[in-house]
Image (tube, helix red, strand yellow):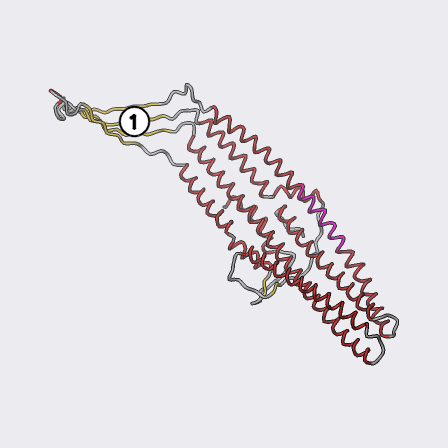
Amino acid sequence: MHRKMCIISAVVFLTISTILTGQTDSRNSLTIETAVSKALENNPTLKVLIKEISALEAVKIQSGLMPNPELSVDAENLFGKGDFVGFNGSEITAQVSQSIMLAGKISKLEKVAEMNVSLAEWDYEANRLIIITNVRKAFNQALVVQQLIKKNKELIKLSEDLLENINMRVKAGKISLAEVSRTKIIINSLQIALTKLQYEYEAAIMELKTLIYDPTFSFTELKGSFKYYFELPPYDTLLVQLESNPNLKRYESEYAKQKAVLSYEESKATPDLTLSAGYKRLNEISANTFVLGASIPLPLFNRNQGSIQEAEIRYDQKKVEFESTRNRLTLRLNLLYNRLNTLLKTANQLKTESIPETEKAFKIIKEGNLVGRFAILDVLDTQRTLFELQNQYLIVIGEIQSVKAELEGLISKEIK
């Protein structure tokens, strides 16, 4: 696979450089690096493609071999009558024939086989990118849900502590018993949301394990952080980098293959020459002679016209396929770019405006509750609003990670 080192080096970043960073593995935690590594190691599709490349390499070796010579032995005038009784008048000929493939057929057929190997290598790289992207997205989704569960448990704990404080104030006759019921209702809704998150987490972990293809591999938690500091390049820059996508790069090999096929089909219009040489024994006169021969088909009717025309059409067909693939990937790039740009703006607004303002409001209402200016319910509502915004911020960051991973998979390059 030496001819694809350029694309391999271009996508290595996906396994060693990630947005969700986890520098070390603990015994019971899983980092995104480990998840990607195991997925690449265990994925059956990649294993099949590696075997396919090896098989096509063997086909290339076979296509470069000359035809074997043929040995033939003929005996004439045997077991007749008169002078031809037994072997008396027999003629025995032993000769070797060799087919000579003209017009460079062997080298041209070998070139076709070489391009088939190259295409299989591009298929490997395309699938490798897809696997890496899918694992990163699945890991990110599971990590976000894991963090949401922690945040939700934290909110429930704070609400339960507040409930104890409310019970004490009710006993002291400072507030109404209705505040207790309202607080319990809020806690119940939070517990329902937590149950839903736990189910989503189990589903996300199951998807991740499916991508890893290792039923014996176990872990208790995911290890990563929520950093998304990068500068989104201009769209035109990414559009140029899209040309590095293996689904587009493979057409360089597709064109080369079709040209090689056309050249090979054209060479088949030239018939092959067969040469022969041998020894002939004339028993009737007890003499030995040598025989030489040459034969070549006359291309009067079949000059391989149909196959040549087919090869020309196939070459034009690949041009249409290339344009279709490029348009599809360009459209996907445009959608992902706009989506990522929107998510980055949303995350920035949440981080710099919505969350800070809600934190200020929560502080004011919490302090005001202590002097009787705000009810307990106001404190709970503001606290829940703050946590919802923080959760929304985590979800947006998670979407940023997923979209960025898919975008990097399209351009085969890391966005820093």
The foreground one among 43 and 244 is 43
Which amino acid type is marked by label 1? Ser
The quadrant where residue 285 appears: top left
Q: Position of residue 157 (x, y in %)?
A: 72, 71
Q: Residue furthest top?
A: 300
The foreground one among 405 and 162 is 162
Identify the residue position indicated by label 1 in the image. Answer: 276
Q: Main secondary structure of the magenta part?
A: helix
Q: Position of residue 27 (x, y in %)?
A: 56, 67
Question: Which residue shows up at 30% across the image and 31% down it?
Answer: 70
Helix, strand or loop at label 1? It is strand
Q: How many marks?
A: 1
Question: Which residue shows up at 82% across the image and 78% down it?
Answer: 170
Q: Position of residue 76 (x, y in %)?
A: 20, 24
- What segment carries the magenta color? 331-346
Q: Residue furthest bottom?
A: 172
State whether residue 188 is above or below residue 81: below
Question: Which residue shows up at 47% across the image and 23% down it?
Answer: 305
